[in-house]
Every structure is written in C-alpha cells, then in structure tokens.
Amino acid sequence: MSQGKLTPYDVIIRPMVTEKTTLARENRKYVFEVNLKANKHQVRNAVEKLFNVKVEKVNILLMKPKPKRRGLFEGDTRRWKKAIVTLKEGHVIKELEVQQ
C-alpha cells in the first residue's frame, strides 16, 4: 500500500457474507469491510472498478470495539469500518452471488 493513495484493492478488504447481508442482496445492497482510511468516494470508485457495476449510494459505519473476556484475560475486539453499497437498478455483483 502506498503512502498517499489507496488502490481499489487496498480499499475493499473483504465482502461480508452473513445471513443478514445475503438477504440484503435482494434489495441490491452489498456489504464490505473496508480500509479504516477509506471514504465514500473511494469505496464507490473501488466497487465500480473491481466489479464493473454502477453504484447508486454508499453508507459507511465505523464499528466500535467490544469488550471481550477469556478467563482472566480482558481485551477488546478490533475497530473496523463497514460499507453498505447500493447498486443501481439492473446491476448485480455476480462474484458474490451464492450458489443455491
């Protein structure tokens, strides 16, 4: 990763695949874990370039660390950023579709 700019491969870390995010795909919404330094414009450009789709809207959430404990050891989960990307009508990310 370069100092100044994030490439599309640096912006998108991984897609989130859960039951809730899989159901959200029916409404053209896809959820990704993104770089903490990425903003909405960078996420939009990265999704459009990597998956060859048109993005309608991007919502970003900063997921706060949660306290965890294992026996005597206490700590926190890591802080991370989540992006909910809504695609324009007629666009689908085929790579993320689950085979049924």
Image (cartoon, rainbow, N blue to C red):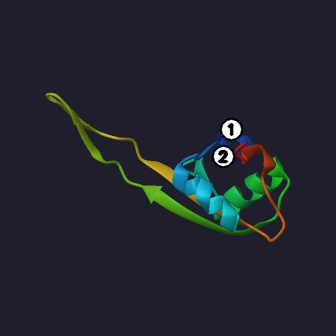
Q: Which residue is mark 1?
A: 2
Residue at the image point whose x is 66% and y is 47% from the top: 11
Mark 1 residue element: loop
In this view, 23 is above or below 36: below
Residue 9 is drawn in which quadrant?
top right
Disc 1 crowd, CA 10 A, few/some/many (<14, 14-19, 20+): few
Tell me the quadrant of the picture where the N terminus can be found: top right
**Amino acid type, callout 1:** Ser
The local secondary structure at tag 2 comes to strand
Quarter of the figure with the C terminus: top right
Q: Is residue 82 above or below residue 17?
A: below
Residue 86, given in percent of the width and then of the height, sits at: 69, 66
Asked if the residues shown at circle 2 and circle 1 are in contact, with their CB atoms under 8 angstroms apart, the answer is no
Left or right: 4 in relation to 74: right
Q: In the rendering, at what x and y percent does residue 37 appear?
A: 56, 51
Residue name at image x 68 percent, y 57 percent: 43
Q: Identity of the amino acid at label 2?
A: Ile
Q: Which mark is residue 65?
A: none
Residue at position x 54%, y 51% in the image: 19
**Image quadrant assignment for residue 82:** bottom right
Q: Give the answer, above or below, for where 3 lies relative to 55.
A: above
Mark nearer the N terminus (2 vs 1) = 1
Identify the residue at image location x=66%, y=46%: 12
Expressed as whole percent of the image width and height from the top left, the position of residue 17 reads 58, 46
Where is residue 54 shown, x and y percent of the image?
82, 64
Residue furthest front in the image: 100
**Of tags 2 and 1, which is closer to the observer?**
2
Binning the other alpha carbons within 10 Å of mark 2 as few (below 14), some (14 to 19) or many (20 upward) gives many
Which residue position holds label 2?
12
Q: Alpha carbon of mark 2 to alpha carbon of mark 1: how far?
A: 15 Å
